[in-house]
Image: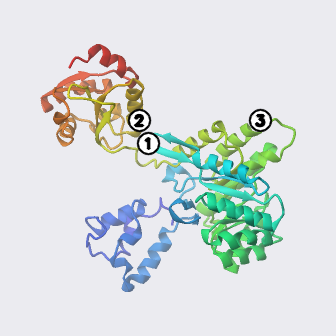
Amino acid sequence: MAARELSPIDVYTLLPKTNCKLCGEENCMAFATKIVNRVVALELCQPLLEERHASNLAKLQEILRPPVKEIILGTGKRAVRIGGKLVMYRHQFAYFNPTAIAVDISDEGSDEEIEQRISKVESLFYDYIGQRLKLDMIALRCTSNDAKRFGATAKRVAERTELPIMLCSLNPDILEAALVIMGKARPLIYAATSDNWKEMADLALMYRCPIVVSAPGDLTMLASLSATLLEYGVEDIVLDPGTFPGEGIGQTVDNFTMLRRAACEEGNKVLAFPLMATPISVWSQKGEIPEIVKWKEAYLMSMLITRYADLMVVNSLDGWVILPNLVLRQNLYTDPRKPVAVDAGLRVFGSPDLASPLLCTTNFALTYYTVASDIEAGGISCFLIVIDTEGISVESSVAGRKLTADKVAEAIRTFKASEKVNHKKLIIPGRAARLSGEIEEATGWEVLVGPMDSSGIPKFLQEKWKP
């Protein structure tokens, strides 16, 4: 049942209805509502885990199962979850498990080259409105066609990183040389085809690893292979419909769209698996300068992040290729039902003293990090009260009464602002100017209306701040 069709009543009727509050909610209906919204885990209902409720637990697990299966790659803290999609379009509900980006490494590289490439993957990150954006996996490709060399390279890579690894070869014997070494780390096997599916399926079952099924450009064959592996006993499958750069981009996007529609809207169990894209395929085109190829890889990444790819393999590690796509991915996978917020509290910038300025803002992440960045850029020592406005920006929170004089007064008391400064002056955002009189009445503090934009804070303090 799709998330948008599932109601709290559907879940509530199968719960024990004890209202025991062990889950942290006031009653079972409140818990059912959060289950439907995917805010809490079903396993938090302790009575439901008892043997007498086993039948209802199974029914709940079935109706809550996402149309696209969630698959875990790797183990431990850095394991990656792909798939788990509930809806085809983000505005219908929300997307879960951001597209995993794997960077390729060839087994023909020297130890130094492999070390450098892993180091670049590990160190490439970007702090974006309080969230660290980074790469997720290593795709180890066998280009040597040498089982012994591939196994040795897999060992070196596994020793240098805890990132999940995808082992890439169409030769089962070559893959097994690496699986013997790192099979317990749950690598992703690439790939089962119409020619080698049985041997590949045996490896997946033996080492309990997820496997990619590949049939570039042939969705009928892809579905047939998936059905065959399911019947054979393989459960964790990733689908590779092929990624065709250049004139094949239209076909690529169409194939990804049809596969996701089959899973989310048609309930096709054979195709209800994560989708894999290979923007790295642009490097197979010869005769173009590297910068043009990288540009093509960048835009192909962006197209397929927005068109249902759950995993992709890339080659370039240039910031201008990777970072825009990391930001795009983060924006797409931010839950549209709730704003991105930071914790309320009192922040300290620089080395303030009792005479330093005291400012306030809302806890909308973009607002907070913009204000914080402008304060730090100006080299200002001050205190900043972050007020809980449910993650809404200044102007909207004032209009929607999420930022009020009473909330400001409560924040001043809660965070003990009067103990941090020996004055009673509060600088509020210019877009909250209409609240200045109310805040003065509610707090007893003198209110200074700051600039409309936080970039004006340094100049404002230089001209207006007189402790």
SS category of the residue bearing label 1? loop
Outermost residue to the top: 463
Q: Earlier in the sequence, mark 1 or mark 3?
A: 1
Amino acid found under the numbered disc labelled 2: Tyr
Q: Which residue is mark 1?
A: 130
Find the distance from the CA under tag 2 to the CA under tag 3: 34 Å
For the residue labelled by badge 2, is the local secondary structure a helix, a strand or a loop?
A: helix
* For residue 87, above or below residue 306: below
**Amino acid type of disc 1?**
Gly
Quarter occupied by the C terminus: top left
Q: Report which residue position mark 3 lands on.
A: 292
Compare residues 130 and 366 and report the one nearer the observer: 130
Which of marks 3 and 2 precedes in the sequence?
Answer: 3
Q: Nearer the viewer, residue 267 or 291?
A: 291
Which of the numbered marks, if any, corresponds to residue 369? Answer: 2
Quarter of the rendering containing residue 390? top left
